[in-house]
Amino acid sequence: MVRRRYSQQWELIYQYVKEARCHPTAEMVYQALKESCPTLSRGTVYRNLNRLAEEGAVVKMNFPVERYDGTLAPHAHLLCARCGAVADLSTVAYDGALDRRAGVSCGWQVARHELLFHGCCPDCQQRAAKTEKGAMS
């Protein structure tokens, strides 16, 4: 990872993404940090996140809205179709053999793959169950 000029804002943004488990959007990073760093601008957040992704310090995830992941090791994700929450799926091991099989089958040199499961998170399931229960009463 090649770093450019150090700044406190860069460090705050980087640490926030590394520690966040919510796979934040740029707006989420900005909202979380603006109180502790009043001089922080949205543009600074976007520029630094893109720079961090280009340098390989974080992973840019292209969902309907770009999100960022501080976990660099390959892993699967879950995406809630209702609320848009993103979570790591650490119980499913990354299958490097799949990369090799895919590469052999098509003649490509496959570096990695991304696995995304779509569904409904526990919070949305709970809200739906309460709504359903209320409608039956």
Image (cartoon, helix red, strand yellow):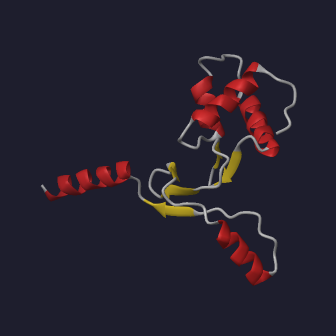
Instruction: Residue lying at the far bottom in this picture: please name it.
Output: 105
The image shows residue 38, relative to residue 20, as above or below, that is above
Farthest left residue?
A: 137
Q: How many numbered circles are shown?
A: 0
Q: Quadrant of residue 99?
A: bottom right
Looking at the picture, tell me which residue is in the foreground, 37 or 89: 89
Question: Where on the picture, by quarter, is residue 106?
Answer: bottom right
Q: Residue furthest front?
A: 97
Picture residue at 81% right of the left edge, 45% below the top: 54
In the rendered structure, the answer to whether residue 45 lies left or right of residue 137 reads: right
Position of the C terminus by quadrant: bottom left
x and y percentages locating residue 111 in the rendered image: 77, 64
Residue 130 left/right relative to 91: left
Residue name at image x 58 percent, y 44 percent = 23
The percent coordinates of residue 89 (x first, y second) are: 51, 55
Position in image of residue 62 (x %, y %): 67, 54
Q: Nearer the viewer, residue 88 or 124?
A: 88
> Where residue 100 appears, x then y in whole percent?
72, 73
Question: In the depicted view, which residue is nearer to us: 99 or 133?
Answer: 99
State the residue in front, 46 or 97: 97
Q: Is residue 76 above or below residue 98?
A: above
Q: Is residue 116 above or below residue 67?
A: below
Q: Residue at x 57, y 27 (%)?
A: 32
Query: Where 103 falls versus 118 (above or below)?
Result: below
Q: Which quarter of the figure is the N terminus placed in?
A: top right
Look at 68% across and 25% down and name the residue there: 12
Q: Is residue 22 left or right of residue 38?
A: left
